[in-house]
Image (cartoon, rainbow, N blue to C red):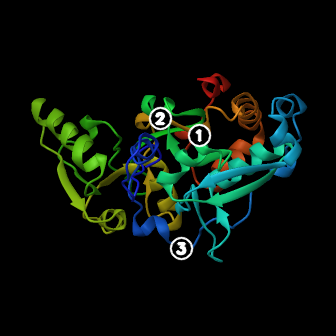
């Protein structure tokens, strides 16, 4: 999910440990482009003009080089993944990175990297920024700085039109069949806690059904075996789009949303410039264009520029 990706490589060291926490395994459904996938290429960043005030905040070496190196792990659509040529990195983070670069008057170089090597790479100066759906946590803030750009949490996929009027609220799910992927935070923590709330209130328990992959859980919904699927709201929205609208994310706020943002080395000197550039993008039409292009629900958007400075 947006704030709970799981690294595939567990290695030692403080930065590597920090990079390996707070994320979810990529399912088959998330690693394959299907019909209806957004076209490659960046969103309409041509509408963005260089913000000279933000550019003036850049470290001299970055401003003179004219290049911003952004590392991403291209295995997590819709945020970062390879286009059909298997070499062009595309996705939400790629477009957002291009937009930040446009505001700063810099050429963006997208660098593929394994998830757990990005934060150490920032500390060593190998990369300028890390944009790979990093959740903003207190532990990670000890090692790197963050500039938030999204917020997200758990959502609920339902049949088109939500005929059962379900939401990410235990009271609406009591007695319903709800699926989740095995090993996910939804299967391990959230659904059991919701079901307990139901029984404690004297209502039927949730019929929890857990599947090996997110694709299997989604299929259970489209085939009518369950009434809902609980997972990351952003992934669900994107998968629903690829499925041709066979399911949708129920309206309402995400459950336990967390901030997600750009990571950068504490000694990079880039923090003020990236904060200013991100604010400029958030306040421009491009931010909404990128979110719409990649199917992000409105609940993930940051609506106050003050959040960028947190």
Asked if the residues shown at circle 1 and circle 2 are in contact, with their CB atoms under 8 angstroms apart, the answer is: yes
Residue 103 visible from this viewpoint: no
At x 43% / y 41%, what residue is drawn? 18
At x 74% / y 56%, what residue is drawn? 109
Q: Residues within 10 Å of mark 3 (few under 14, many from 20)?
A: some
Of mark 1 and mark 3, the one earlier in the sequence is 3
Which secondary structure lies at badge 2?
helix
Q: Residues within 10 Å of mark 1 (few under 14, many from 20)?
A: many
Corner quadrant of residue 39: bottom right
Q: Which residue is mark 1?
A: 263
Q: Which residue is mark 3?
A: 34
Q: Pick the residue in front: 157 or 131.
A: 131
Q: Nearer the viewer, mark 1 or mark 3?
A: 1
Position of residue 163 relative to residue 37, above or below, is above
Left or right: 105 with respect to 220? right
Q: Which residue is mark 2?
A: 140
Of mark 1 and mark 2, the one earlier in the sequence is 2
| Alpha carbon distance from label 1 to label 2 | 9 Å
- Count of numbered marks: 3
Which secondary structure lies at badge 3?
loop
Left or right: 28 with respect to 306? left
Residue 68 image offset from top left, x and y in percent: 76, 48
Q: Nearer the viewer, mark 3 or mark 2?
A: 2
Residue 298 image offset from top left, x and y in percent: 57, 41
Q: Residues within 10 Å of mark 2 (few under 14, many from 20)?
A: many
Left or right: 9 with respect to 51? left
Residue 33 visible from this viewpoint: yes
Of mark 3 and mark 2, the one earlier in the sequence is 3
| Alpha carbon distance from label 1 to label 3 | 30 Å
| Alpha carbon distance from label 3 to label 2 | 34 Å
Residue 26 image offset from top left, x and y in percent: 42, 61
Which secondary structure lies at badge 1?
strand
């Amino acid at each position: 999910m947006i704030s709970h990706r799981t690294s595939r490589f567990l290695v030692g060291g403080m930065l590597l440990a920090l990079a390996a926490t707070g994320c979810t395994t990529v399912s088959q459904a998330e690693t394959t482009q299907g019909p209806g996938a957004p076209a490659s290429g960046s969103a309409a960043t041509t509408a963005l003009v260089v913000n000279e005030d933000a550019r003036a905040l850049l470290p001299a070496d970055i401003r003179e080089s004219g290049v911003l190196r952004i590392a991403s792990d291209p295995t997590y659509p819709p945020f970062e993944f390879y286009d059909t040529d298997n070499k062009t990195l595309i996705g939400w983070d790629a477009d957002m990175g291009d937009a930040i670069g446009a505001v700063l008057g810099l050429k963006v170089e997208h660098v593929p990297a394994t998830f757990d090597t990005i934060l150490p790479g920032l500390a060593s100066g190998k990369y300028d920024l890390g944009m790979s759906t990093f959740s903003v946590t207190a532990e990670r803030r000890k090692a790197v700085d963050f500039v938030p750009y999204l917020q997200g949490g758990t959502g609920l996929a339902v049949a088109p039109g939500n005929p059962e009027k379900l939401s990410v609220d235990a009271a609406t799910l009591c007695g319903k069949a709800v699926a989740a992927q095995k090993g996910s935070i939804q299967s391990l923590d959230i659904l059991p806690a919701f079901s307990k709330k139901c029984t404690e209130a004297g209502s039927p328990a949730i019929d929890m059904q857990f599947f090996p992959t997110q694709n299997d859980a989604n299929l259970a919904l489209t085939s009518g075996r369950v009434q809902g699927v609980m997972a990351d709201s952003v992934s669900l929205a994107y998968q629903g789009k690829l499925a041709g609208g066979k399911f949708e994310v129920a309206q309402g706020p995400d459950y336990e949303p967390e901030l997600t943002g750009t990571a950068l080395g504490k000694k990079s000197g880039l923090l003020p410039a990236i904060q200013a550039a991100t604010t400029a993008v958030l306040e421009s039409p491009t931010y909404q264009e990128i979110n719409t292009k990649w199917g992000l629900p409105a609940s993930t958007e940051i609506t106050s520029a003050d959040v960028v400075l947190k």
